[in-house]
Amino acid sequence: MAIESAFHNKYSLVKGAARRARQLQSGALPLIAAKSMKACRVAQDEIKSGHVKFVLPVQLVEPPLVLPN
């Protein structure tokens, strides 16, 4: 499934759609002409059409602590 690979996993897809739906409910304009008026469905359609991208945060890895002997 192409959507799943773009969103890392199903959990990321759900979180991305929920975040976008909240943006739409807060007054953001839809990026596509959707058939539905529901924010959740519009967000899913935007993701499916490739208009919404999901960026994974970079995880900081601390160097291992070296203790003197």
Image: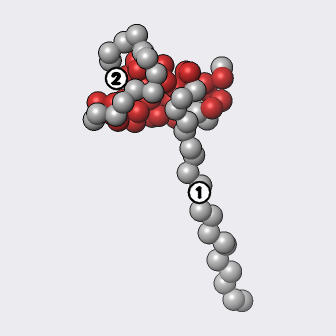
Query: At x 49% / y 24%, what residue is drawn?
Result: 46
Give x and y (percent) for residue 56. Answer: 57, 46
Name the residue tied to disc 2. Answer: 39
- Res 23 visible: yes
CB under 8 Å between discs 1 and 2: no
Say which amino acid is labelled 2.
Ala
Give x and y (percent) for residue 36. Answer: 37, 12
Query: At x 32% / y 18%, what residue is drawn?
Result: 38
Between 37 and 14, the one nearer to me in the picture = 37
Name the residue tied to disc 1. Answer: 59
Q: Which sits earlier in the primary sequence, circle 1 or circle 2?
A: 2
Give x and y (percent) for residue 68. Answer: 69, 89
Say which amino acid is labelled 1.
Gln
Secondary structure type for disc 1: loop
Give the number of the mark in front: 1 or 2. 2
- Res 18 visible: no
Which label is found at residue 29? none
